[in-house]
Amino acid sequence: MKIMITGGTKGIGRALANQLIATGHSLGIISRNLDPVLLDQGVKCLSQDLSELNQVQGAIANLAEQLGGVDVLVNSAGIGYVGNLSETPLADFQQVINLNLLSVWQASLGVLPIMRSQRQGKIINVASIAGKQAFPGWGAYCASKFALLGLTQALAAEEQSYGIQVMAVCPGSVDTPLWDTLPPAVTANFNRQAMLQPETVAETIMAMIQLPASATITELVLLPSGGVL
């Protein structure tokens, strides 16, 4: 299969990339920073800041051309944000929405012409349990992930007749570098050892990729065994 991942150099995206490489899939990565290890492994890599929304569709189409087509797009890129809504600057809220929601929309539009023409394809969006349940202090992040699930459902309904499956995975807390970008006062409240590992989420996405065209998963919630952290 020809598979593309946004944000494939860190966290869940990187764990998924490693598993796809190990299983022999053709892989393309679009991320702001390139990874020389992935390049050495023959992965098609494209450097693009996904928050530059007017360039995302073209970048995705360019990467698909380099890959020789696309069967699966995994939208894994995203950012975290902590702060009460009453104290969140408009520019910060917009940044979260741009990357966690609008870049996913634009990336999906970049692959739709190919998937429609071949009458098959999968788009898998990495959402969050924060798209199903609101958490105080995470308002902008929750809003972006709730909206991402709405986008996923609407796109799935619109593209079903073309044989395109649009799915979402909603992990609970995952021990990724995202936590290193948050204030220490926030991270001190979380036991990262009890979180999901990126490899576990990647294995779940692999199962979604391997689903036959006759079946689909609309939303898959994956939590640490200890529950929501």
Image: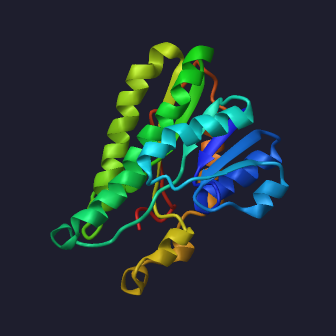
Q: Is residue 211 above or below residue 185?
A: above
**Nearer-the-camera pick, 145 or 217:** 145
Instruction: Tell me what residue is drawn at x 71 percent, y 62 percent.
Output: 35
Instruction: Tell me what residue is drawn at x 41 percent, y 68 percent.
Output: 229
Q: Is residue 39 left or right of residue 196?
A: right
Q: Is residue 4 above or below residue 112?
A: below
**Nearer-the-camera pick, 184 or 89:** 89
> Residue 174 location, x and y as percent?
52, 64
**Nearer-the-camera pick, 84 or 170:** 84
Task: Return the residue found at the far left.
Answer: 86
Res 214 → quadrant:
top right
> Residue 96 location, x and y as percent?
35, 59
Q: Is residue 142 left or right of residue 90?
A: right
Residue 221 visible in rendering? yes
Q: Is residue 144 left or right of residue 188?
A: left
Q: Quadrant of the N terminus?
A: top right
Res 163 → quadrant:
top right
> Residue 168 location, x and y as percent?
47, 41
> Residue 175 location, x and y as percent?
55, 69
Instruction: Tell me what residue is drawn at x 36 percent, y 37 percent.
Output: 151
